[in-house]
Image (spheres, rainbow, N blue to C red):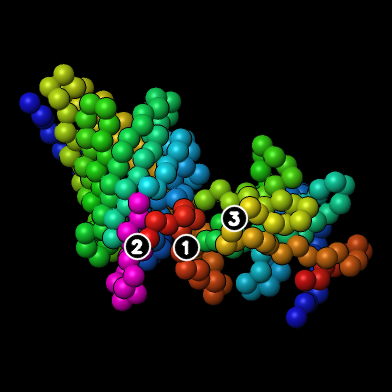
Amino acid sequence: MIYEIKFEAKHFTEFDLDNTWIIAQDMEHIDHLHKKTNELIKLNEINLNKDLQINKLYNYIYYTAIRKIFFFFKIKINGYRKIIHDYEIFQTEKFLFFEVNLISKYFFDDEFKKTCIHDIFCIKVPIFLYPFKKILELAVRKHIKSQFLEDEVYRKRLKELNDRGIKKRYIFLTKLNG
Amino acid sequence: MSKKYTIKLDKKLPFYEWIDTDKEVIVLEFNNKIEVIESICPHYGGKLQVNQNKPNELICPFHGLKFDITNCTSSNNIFKKIRKYKVISNKPFVVEG
């Protein structure tokens, strides 16, 4: 029997939607900028978007990663992420006993006048892990909060460069499979 | 076309300086010499910093690209080199590049 733990998180940033979107798609910075919460990430297959009219770097990516939970437990995962709409990513990660599914939406929030990152989680767990649902939720919330704050540095840097007329096109460092 | 830039050495090394609208450098001391090196990572613009684990390297905090301070090259196939400015005067401190 599989149980679902569902929750949502919203983070707001002063920085613009387009740079927020690029950083959201960039998986190669995860084990450098987010090394407190990630030991390693390896992109195994990248299906690139070749249509320049569509605002996305790729269609989907298969990856493996070593996540640090509560900053010290290391867990190896297999992951898959797909850009499902403009400014919307679906991601699923398989841990040993459970699976974390996430839909992340990026938009400008008219009420708060800021860019919003809206994460919708569904963690699928076996019955023996269900009593620990609050701990799992807390671990995930800490993980994304930490990454959000570190990404603010990245967003700030891109804004600084853009303000000086420097705009770079993102190029994958991983050798691409096709 | 190379240009000359005057930099005030009135801050603690290493420090960053925008020497032109689109040119940022890191000014650092290496082997008892002051070096002036481009600090915008050629990959995606990260602010290159001295690698705490290997002081002869600059490292990008975003994606981990590394550049040797001596010859300003990396092992990456696409982003091979960053610019090092030539010191042409010490008082005032002027570089060219």
Q: Secondary structure at mark 1?
A: loop
- Which of the chains bears the disc numbered 3? B
Q: Magenta includes A30?
A: no
Residue type at tag 2:
Leu
Residue type at tag 3:
Asn
Q: Secondary structure at mark 3?
A: loop
Q: Which residue is mark 3?
A: B76
**Residue drawn at the location 54% of the way across and 67% of the way down:** A161
Are marks 2 and 1 in one subunit? yes
Q: CA distance from mark 3 to mark 2?
A: 21 Å
The magenta segment = A45-58
User: Of all residues shown, which one is farthest toward the left?
Assistant: A1
Tell me which corner region of the image, top left, top right, bottom left or bottom right, holds residue A20. Answer: bottom left
User: Of all residues shown, which one is farthest toward the bottom?
Assistant: B1
Q: Are marks 3 and 2 in contact (CB under 8 Å)?
A: no
Asked if one can make out residue A14 in the rendered structure from this viewpoint, the answer is no
Q: Which residue is mark 2?
A: A48
What secondary structure predominates along the stretch shown in magenta?
Answer: loop
Q: Secondary structure at mark 2?
A: strand
Q: CA distance from mark 3 to mark 1?
A: 12 Å
Q: Which residue is mark 1?
A: A171
Whether B34 is drawn above or below B1: the answer is above
Q: Magenta includes A49?
A: yes
Q: Which quadrant of the figure contains the N terminus of chain A?
A: top left
**Residue drawn at the location 64% of the way across and 74% of the way down:** B21
Whether A5 is drawn above or below A178: the answer is above
Mark 3 neighbour class, 10 Å CA radius: few under 14, some 14 to 19, many 20 or more:
few
Pointer 2 or 1: first along the chain = 2
